[in-house]
Amino acid sequence: MERPLAMNLGTVAHAARRRAGLTQAEVARRVGVQLEVYGRIERGEMFPSVPTLRRICVALEIGSDELLGLELSQPSGLRRLVDAARGLRQPQLRLLHRLARTLHAEPRE
């Protein structure tokens, strides 16, 4: 295991947990691991198995790319828009997409 990857995963998991307003114990229970194990993951002392990694993503409601530090950083405005779009129903997403296309279209002459 590469230590920087585990450290980055721990930092991202910690931040996501705090944003979600969860305790380590709550996340550990949701993930199905002992509190001590989850604590070691957040501190970057161990790297979780792939199934555990997936359960952490579900528990923290973040993508695996973000958790692994593979997601390109997005401007905060775009991140807020993506966060706001999560959970929208399909008709709402279609409207949002149409609005974005309209706003992005080049002016017609």
Image: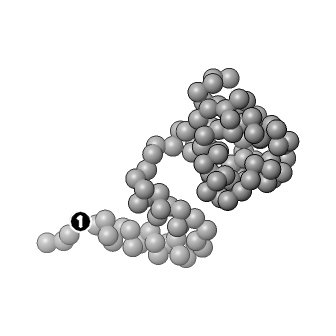
Q: Is residue 4 visible?
A: yes
Q: Is residue 88 above or below residue 10?
A: below
Residue for point 82% across, 38% down: 36
- Residue 49 placement, left or right of 109: right
Q: Position of residue 101 (x, y in %)?
A: 36, 67
Residue for point 39% across, 73% down: 99
Amino acid residing under circle 1:
Glu
Outermost residue on the left side: it is 109
Q: Is residue 69 above or below residue 27?
A: above
Front residue of 26/50: it is 26
Q: How is the image coloured?
A: one colour
Q: Which residue is mark 1?
A: 106
- Residue 29 placement, left or right of 75: right
- Label 1 CA crowd tier, 10 Å (few <14, some 14–19, many 20+): few
Q: Position of residue 52 (x, y in %)?
A: 77, 41
Front residue of 78/103: it is 78
Q: Is residue 31 visible?
A: no
Element marked by disc 1: loop
Image quarter (top left, top right, bottom left or bottom right) of the C terminus:
bottom left
